[in-house]
Amino acid sequence: MGIHKFFTSLNDLERIIRCPGRFKFEEHNVAAHSWKVSQYALVFATIEEEHGANINWKALYEKTINHDYGEVFIGDIKTPVKHSSPELKEMIAHVETRMVEDFIEREIPPSFQSIFKERLKEGKDYTTEGKLLEFADKLDQVYESFSELKRGNMDPEFLTIYHHALGRLLQIDLPHSVSYFKTVILEDLLKEESVTDMQHLTNDVLQSIESALI
């Protein structure tokens, strides 16, 4: 078992579909999501580095590529459920953390266990790398929900995900990344052909953020 068990568990991430139980024009799995998050983080870490930030690239890649490993054990919990209350979100995080730790203690050789516990723990924190992880994670939620909405899939869950992810992304304490996203990427995103008024939906999010700051 041991490391072999860890390797084979990675196959499960390919079989876990994000936003389960909803009609989608495109299916996305957790393994692909983790890879995309690492690529988004690479770009925005480069932007932050160009503006003077000291990036721990090793920590960044470890955080991004491993950030959803715990879903091997609990699957992908729908966004509205996960964020329905802070208490529930904390409970889910605790269960996920405990199951990852149990797996490590049961399957990973003792000489590697402390390393795995560090690398597979929750990576979103107040470090620059932790903020970049959250930024990249929310960005993929924006892309996934935008892709559905622009094609006319007005499932309320995708509306919720788009509002929540875009709103949170724009408030993360990475001013250079946020500025680049708003002035370059978001503008390009809204130029895409769409059967839905994505400009209107996006303005709703921007206005809600501005109202909260008043």
Image (cartoon, helix red, strand yellow):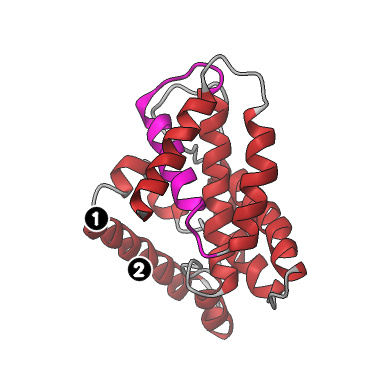
Q: Image quadrant for the N terminus?
A: bottom right
Marks 1 and 2 sit apart, C-alpha to C-alpha, by 15 Å
* Badge number at residue 88: 1
Position of 139 relative to 44 (above/below): above
Name the image quarter holding residue 26.
Answer: top right
Residue 8 visible to an observer of this rendering: no
Position of 31 relative to 21 (above/below): below
SS state under label 2:
helix
Answer whether labels 1 and 2 touch (C-beta < 8 Å).
no
The residue drawn where x is 45% and y is 58% is 70
Name the image quarter holding residue 161.
Answer: top left
Residue 178 visible to an observer of this rendering: yes
The residue drawn where x is 48% and y is 38% is 18
Residue 152 within the segment the image draws in magenta: yes
The reply, left or right, for residue 208 in relation to residue 62 is left
Say which amino acid is labelled 2.
Arg
Q: Position of residue 198 (x, y in %)?
A: 53, 26
Span of residues in magenta = 150-173
| Front position in the image: 119 or 141 | 141
Q: Position of residue 116 (x, y in %)?
A: 55, 75
Say which amino acid is labelled 1.
Leu
